[in-house]
Amino acid sequence: MSTLMLPVRGNYLDEGFSLWSWLSSVDHKRIAILYTISITMFFFVGGVAASLIRLNLVTPTGDFVSAETYNKLFTMHGVIMVWFFLIPSIPSTLGNFLVPLMIGARDMAFPRLNLASWYLYIGGGLFTVGALIAGGVDTGWTFYTPYSTMFSNTHVIAAAAGVFIVGFSSILTGINFIVTIHKMRAPGMTWFRLPLFIWSMYATAIIFVLATPVLAMTLFLLAIERFAGVGVFDPALGGDPLLFQHLFWFYSHPAVYVMILPAMGVASEIITCFARKNVFAYRSMAFAVLAIAVIGFLVWGHHMFVAGTSVYSSIVFSILSFLVAIPSAIKVFNWTATLYKGSIHFEAPMLYLLGFVGLFTVGGMTGLFLASLALDVHLHDTYFVIAHFHYIMVGGSVMAFLGAIHFWWPKITGRMYSDRWARFAAIVVFIGFNLTFFPQFVLGYLGMPRRYHEYPPEFQVLNVLSSAGASVLAVGYLLPLLYLLWSLKYGPRATANPWGATGLEWQTSSPPPVDNFASIPIVTAPPYQYEPPEGPHPNPSAGQKGEGSEGAVGARDGLS
Amino acid sequence: MWNFPLHPPADTPLATRVDHLFYTWLGLAGVVTIAVFFLIVYFSVKYRHGSKADRAMPTGAELRRESHRIEFAWIATPLVIFLGMGFWAADLYYVHASPVANATEVYAVGKQWMWKIEHIGGQREIDELHVPAGRPIKLIMTSQDVIHSFFMPAFRIKQDVLPGRYTILWFTAEHPGDYHLFCTQYCGTDHARMIGHVVVMAPADFQKWLTGGNAQQSMAEEGAGRFRQYGCSGCHGANASVHAPKLEGLFGRRVQLSDGTSVIADERYIHDSVMLPRSQVVAGYAPIMPSFQGQIAEEDLLDIIEYIKSLRDANPGLVK
Amino acid sequence: MITHPVPAIRTYVLVWVGLIVLLLLTLGSAFIPLGWGNAAINLAIAVAKSLLVIFFYMHLRSAHYVLRIAATAGFFWLAILLGLSLTDFVTRY
Ligand SMILES: [Cu+2]
């Protein structure tokens, strides 16, 4: 530090190198990095659990691990991937980094609250990891009663406490986003000039704030029933187990949209940039995001069509579920239409995002199968459901998350990675993903139930295919870890705007200074004003090549 | 040795109808997905950076009008299709949820980690369900412990089985055969072993199976024994000195409760009267009936319920 | 920031006394068997208590309209939770 004699404050990464300078920083960009590191760790823990699951399912007799261990593995996989990876993934990392930058602010509205969110996240994580080290939990991530309250003799309360705590992290992050977006927009940044990523963060934040308290309350009730025998959900104590399911899914269904809305925001940013075209129908894109957030609250009953709810209620929830599919369909069509007459580049972020649109479409369409009552009676709790939601959450959210990391990596770290490797990894992930999860649709229709440690032999071929795909997928996820880390040290320096993108975040240096902008920008136009590609060789970002146009940045020439 | 099915057997009229629904969806989803993939690839090639494709676009008001028209089309079309498919599926679901009146009743109790089945005639089986082909069967199911789910993929039906409640599943199997039975609601360690067979038999064979079975007495007779064994008759019997309601003609009747409400006496009501007697006290009686929670197994209680049902038309005072 | 008048300590104390009185009412009503009436009375008392907390302790009586909208949204969502759950609970066989 003493060697840096900067007259003005330099970029945020050079602001301090000690561990404490990171752990005590209230700079939204540094907090985003804290999240990125911790989330990546949790992702690989959850991923190891997934690999062991797939390994066990190679044989129909489940020879690899015992039934107890298997049950703990899928519980751990679910709990960690849902609450410690997917839900915070894009909002806490890229959202934290980008929301102030994209709206032209110097930080979040409540920087200290932001840091507190991270500590809550880590605290909850430690609780949960503690429960796992102490012997694990075997209830499944859904914690269904009365199994979780009266029958499981594993560490349910500790795990639930971890989830309870991390819920508060979500709530605080949500409040921070809402207030920041309402109050801190740069002059001229009207609501309809906001990038769609901001709209998606806003919708996500609303869900955080309105749904998470219900989860906290539900887990609390679960804990007192288990701990003190107060009858709420257990029929032997006069409770109703379906009450738990109603409360749980009132949170957890919107939570699914917490996982996908940010991915949709990312898609709109990246597809417009690499198609060099304004997004098709900006306003309906913004309203679709809000509609998904609101209607997403009205559909939770579709998780309970065979649970013993009334026929009338099932019909109501089925119709509402079809309605929520409409805004999602609009988004897919609009992204596709955005490509029309663009000038399309195929760097790695774009490959990830095109993959996202395709896989999300498959995930969304199969969701319609499940919203169809009579079909859900057959498909519920089978591998069809597993395949469906992995198409949404892995094919959708994780693809978009990876695309986003690649897209904003130069901005976050100031370095370029090897685009060649990145494109290769994107293709490996796409292939591995489909190989893993497509066979599960077939398995599901054949009737293979989820959460099965062993299965009838006729399902083996498809299971082996799926496990083989999982190993390809694992390679696809390890590759970015390697070349991205490599780029931190050896990657060429990035320019301020290597992709020639339009957002405000690209108008400041890479990595951004501590205060984000030398002077607060004044916004005069809507987002995505890419120049219409006139001739066969449009040159939209000419003159934007900054100092370090050598090396990999030179390879960006395809873009300029 | 090559055992690699891609489609499950379908053995009920409902299963065939569900398959039609499924393949219709598959067609629709296939068309949409292929269209999206095709357009992405097509645009990617045609409008790749540097291609000479024509990129002239309408602008201003014309663009807005154009895009409004397109947007309206792709909001309205899916909406109509979705709702149509939704009603079709809801109609089938209604069939699934409404057992026909003349169905043969069979009882099932889920228990970590087995299925206990009992036929009206008293035949009991574990992890196997024998049924005759061509006759509607109605399963009345409950759980001894956690939530389970009774899933028969060949019939395309499943239903969660809850403790403290009786849920129902009905079907008419068409052909003799041996089909999978799975528990699909995660229920603890050996969830994956809570599986079994549904054996559909020709009616004559089934009749033979019934008589050759292990039944000593019918469920109702069994229940009458339990009724004495657990001391119910000491209060509810004809000669009981305790002031307790008579159970003859109870089943299906409306019962007035002491908190002013009233309920129809169905299986659930009798179950709760025994397991949670304080929750519903009959008007005019003192709440002295003890709870039998943890003492009576669910399958024994089913026998008792069947016994009380058999008293439906009996004369008061018949209970010994 | 929109500033708003902060209520006097006296108001807080009075509200607190009101809350305690309502609590005692709930307790008392438990000893009078009224069937469905008990539930209705207790719910009404609970609503009154939350309104007191919301308006006085959470200062919503004098808050900016955006804050009031935000708070109302919470109730709206609670209504969704209860309303749609009831589609199940009141129509089960
Ligand atoms: Cu089970």
Image: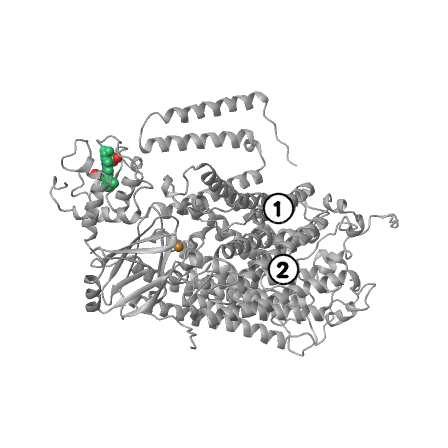
In the rendered structure, which disc, 2 or 1, sits on the residue that comes first in sequence? 1
Based on the displayed image, in which of its 4 quarters is residue A112 positioned?
Answer: top right
Name the residue: 30% across, 50% down: B166
Rendering colour mode: one colour
- For the question of whether residue A434 can be seen, the reply is no
Host chain of mark 2: A
Residue B236 placement (x, y as % from top left): 19, 37
Q: Is residue C64 left or right of residue A381?
A: right
**Share a chain, discs 2 and 1?**
yes
Residue A383 placement (x, y as % from top left): 46, 63
**Disc 2 and disc 1: Cα gap in Å?**
24 Å
Q: Secondary structure at mark 2?
A: helix
Q: Is residue A138 left or right of residue A398?
A: left
Label 2 environment density (alpha carbons within 10 Å; few <14, some 14–19, many ≥20): many
Host chain of mark 1: A
In this view, A468 is above or below A244: below
In this view, B142 is above or below A433: above
Label 1 environment density (alpha carbons within 10 Å; few <14, some 14–19, many ≥20): some
**Which residue does the numbered mark 2 point to in the structure image?**
A401
Q: Secondary structure at mark 1?
A: helix
Towards the viewer: A206 or A227 = A227
Q: Residue furthest bottom?
A: B52
User: Closer to the camera: disc 2 or disc 1?
Assistant: 1
Residue C26 placement (x, y as % from top left): 41, 27
Query: What residue type is disc 2 on?
Result: Phe
Residue A52 placement (x, y as % from top left): 56, 61
Towards the viewer: B122 or A283 = B122
Whether disc 1's CB lies below 8 Å from ligand 1 is answered no
**Which residue does the numbered mark 1 point to in the structure image?**
A126
Name the residue: 64% across, 62% down: A402
